[in-house]
Image (cartoon, helix red, strand yellow):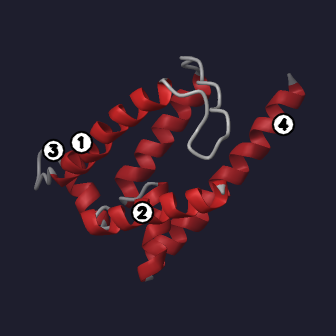
Amino acid sequence: MRNIVSAISGGLFGLGLLISGMTDTAKVQGWLDLFGQWDPTLAFVLGGAILPMLLAWRVAARRKVSATGEAFPALPGPLIDGRLLTGSVLFGAGWALAGFCPGPAIASLTWGGLGGLVFVIAMVGGMVLSTVVGKRRLAAA
């Protein structure tokens, strides 16, 4: 059941990204171009995502189990460390340079385009490299 709910949720997310234009790298880069041809579209997409999630988190906080009957995972602590800061900087730099973040990059694979494919391959490579480096750092400590 969880896989079905995940597939439907992912499909809806991808459809929303396509409809909102967030798979168009020019839209995302236009949001970041504050002193050029600024495009505020992303602000509306972000607001359209944040508002329903505020409601969803409030409803979820009152429940003992999820809609699929599984326990909710524990909330992460508010730890801000070097890994979080480094990851945030790399994410932001990649997003600004390429105009993609993981969700829209994967959604962009549906309409083709070599740029999206190259980005997804590089993103997956970065994830694998990060995991390998992280394991080596833990082993060395």
SS at badge 2: helix
- Mark 2 or 1, closer to the camera: 2
Query: Residue at point 12% right, 51% down?
Result: 38
Mark-to-mark CA distance, 4 and 3: 40 Å
Q: Which residue is mark 2?
A: 12
The spot of residue 92 in percent (x, y) is 41, 43
Q: Which residue is mark 1?
A: 47
In this rendering, the answer to whether 36 lies above or below 66 is below
Amino acid marked by disc 1: Gly
| Foreground residue among 14 and 94 | 14
- Mark 1 or 4, closer to the camera: 1
Mark-to-mark CA distance, 2 and 3: 30 Å
Amino acid marked by disc 3: Leu
Q: Residues within 10 Å of mark 1 (few under 14, many from 20)?
A: few
**Who comes first in sequence, dot 3 or dot 1?**
3
- Mark 3 or 1, closer to the camera: 1
Q: Is residue 98 left or right of residue 128?
A: left
